[in-house]
Image: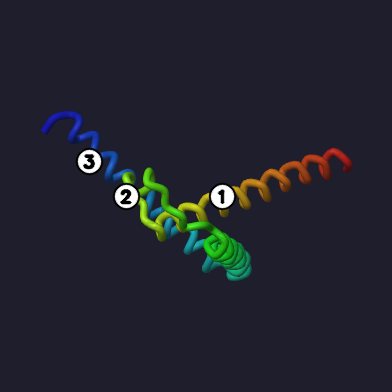
Amino acid sequence: MDSIDIGLYVMFAFFLVAVIAAIVLPLINALKSPKGLLKSMAGVVVLVVVFLIAYAVSDGSVTPRYVMAGVDESSSKLIGAGLTVFYIVFIIAAVGVIFSEINKALK
């Protein structure tokens, strides 16, 4: 066993600890404050609704280049929906930052 193998095993162990902590600690915090959990769930529901709307309006067209890459119609539609959601969330975040800075400057 060389040092690269040992380093990979250590990295996998740290990654496993990080994944478990990322799942368990927010659940513990959510159980302490159920109102915060409702706010988080509302955000998740809004994101799901935005994704469903984006999926409904996205185009599933497939070009010959997509076919060579192994992309079918459903994958193309899913990718389009993901990009649309990204654009929407990015624009909302940018407007929020701009509004926050203007609001802070006016106070």
Name the residue at the front extreme: 64
Relative depth, front residue between 18 and 40: 40
N-term mark: 2 or 1: 2
Above or below, 5 relative to 95? above
Is residue 36 in sight in this rendering? no
Is 12 rendered above or below residue 41? above
Which residue is label 1 attached to? 86
Which of the two discs, 3 and 1, labels the residue nearer the N terminus?
3
Nearer the observer: mark 3 or 1; the answer is 1
Quadrant location, the N terminus: top left
| Residue drawn at x 63%, y 52% as measured from the top left | 88
Q: Residue furthest right?
A: 106
How far is the residue under mark 2 from the one under mark 1? 23 Å
Tell me, for residue 9, which label it has, or none: 3
Q: Is residue 87 left or right of residue 63?
A: right
Q: Position of residue 15 (x, y in %)?
A: 33, 45
Amino acid bearing label 1: Phe
- The mark that comes first in sequence, 2 or 3, is 3
Where is residue 37? Give x, y as percent: 57, 67
Packing grade of label 1 (10 A; few <14, some 14-19, many >=20) is: some
107 or 46, nearer to the observer:
46
Q: Residue 70: which disc? A: 2
